[in-house]
Amino acid sequence: MKRADVVIVGAGQAGLALSHCLGRAGIDHVVLERGLIGERWRTHAWRSLRLLTPNWLNALPGAPYDGPDPDGFRTRDVFLHDLETYAGRWRMPVECGVEVVSCRRAGEGFVLDTSTGAWSARAVVVATGHCDRPLIPFALDGAKEARGIHASQYRSPGELPPGGVLVVGASASGVQIADELARAGRHVVLSVGKHTRLPRRWRAKDIFWWLRETGHLAERADDLADAESARRQPSLQLAGRPDSADVDLATLQPLGVELTGRVRGIANGEIAFAGDLAASVAAAEAKQARLLAEIDRFAGAARPIRRDPVAVPSSYQRRLSLNDGSIGTVIWATGYARSFGWLEPSALSADGELAHRDGVTGVPGLYALGFRFLRKRDSHFIGGVGSDAEAIAAEIACHLDRNGRKAA
């Protein structure tokens, strides 16, 4: 059995950030990754994907951005290269191709069964990310012509079967995929549910500059009236285009994207949509107006011109056949659920989520990192995970000092 003081599960930005912090503190550790470094960026992202956050915001511990394009948006492949370079520069002890099958308490520590053998550790950090298991809310009951995939399986327009495409979900992934498909000449129907609309740039600054300056990114769960509702908020309706252009419902309609309401059900090869498009758009417009007004008050200057509201079509499809040849693919841009079946039940809440407070679970020595709103609003952002990693590293150091540890 192999041993380490700390086992980090996952070698994405969260796991690597923590590895840097533990290494600087001289804490013996290993990072176990079931695939390659940044595996989900490799397997859960389409080819043209760019990061939603500007380069200046994407610093990791020990690796501030110092390139020539601070306001640009890195491609997926460039970011993967950066992660690999980061791990190599700091000689992080990453073991790839090691899948953790189970993690259980053993005395004052843990035993982890993996695909390559067992590990023992005094502390374990779950850094598997917020995007774990693709969530598909409905089966394509009775569909003979159309096939369904999750957004994480989408790669490019040319790799889809012929025909129109129904994209379900209008958050960041949904609008970007709809935009790419429409520009490639595909007929696209976009099923719109709850979403958050914001401009890519406001008052000549990226919207994330304002979110940082106004304190939104640093908001903690205790600062909010309903933290659980905040955790469930959809991702911002943004894209990281080189021209910093908006990608939202208002920009999609001129491309021919057809809007409709959220999916209500699927039966006998037919999808039924709710008549809630206007309500969903109105809610997003109201939330955007409140946030932009707050930014305007913070800026303390004359208000700029208001953004044009999304024009809701007077009529839209309420039913759509999956067997008449009009739709070849349904893409579910409906988010993810977490999968913690490999952890012992005492670490989980009633809904199956990892129970923690600020990344510290009720199981001594078990920690979480990289999850949405772990400690603050930007905990799952590339640039937000660093301060969380430093805090978790400090918690681990205290735990090890109480229980004894070996030198790195």
Image: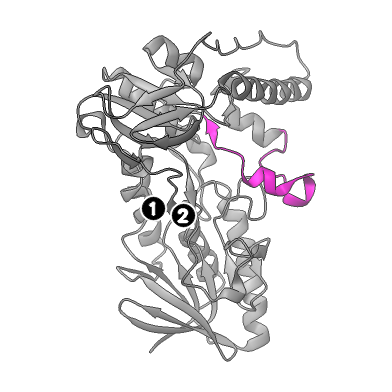
Q: Position of residue 405 (x, y in %)?
A: 57, 86
Tag 2: amino acid? Gln
With 8 as the anchor, is 284 left or right in this view?
A: right
- What residue lies at 51% left-to-right and 10% top-to-bottom? 313
Q: Position of residue 84 (x, y in %)?
A: 34, 55
- What residue lies at 42% left-to-right and 83% top-to-bottom? 119
276 drawn magenta: no
Q: Earlier in the sequence, mark 1 or mark 2?
A: 2
233, 213: nearer the viewer: 233
**Secondary structure under badge 1?**
helix
**Secondary structure under badge 2?**
helix
Please identify the quadrant where the N terminus is shown: bottom left
Mark 2: few, some, or many residues within 10 Å (few <14, many ≥20)? many
- What residue lies at 35% left-to-right and 41% top-to-bottom? 141
With 402 as the anchor, is 183 left or right in this view?
A: left
C-alpha distance separating marks 1 and 2: 7 Å
Q: Are marks 1 and 2 in contact (CB under 8 Å)?
A: yes
Instruction: Indicate which disc residue 83 carries.
Output: 1
Magenta span: 214-237
Tag 1: amino acid? Leu
Residue 136 visible somewhere in the drawing: yes
Location of mark 2 (residue): 13
139, 116: nearer the viewer: 139
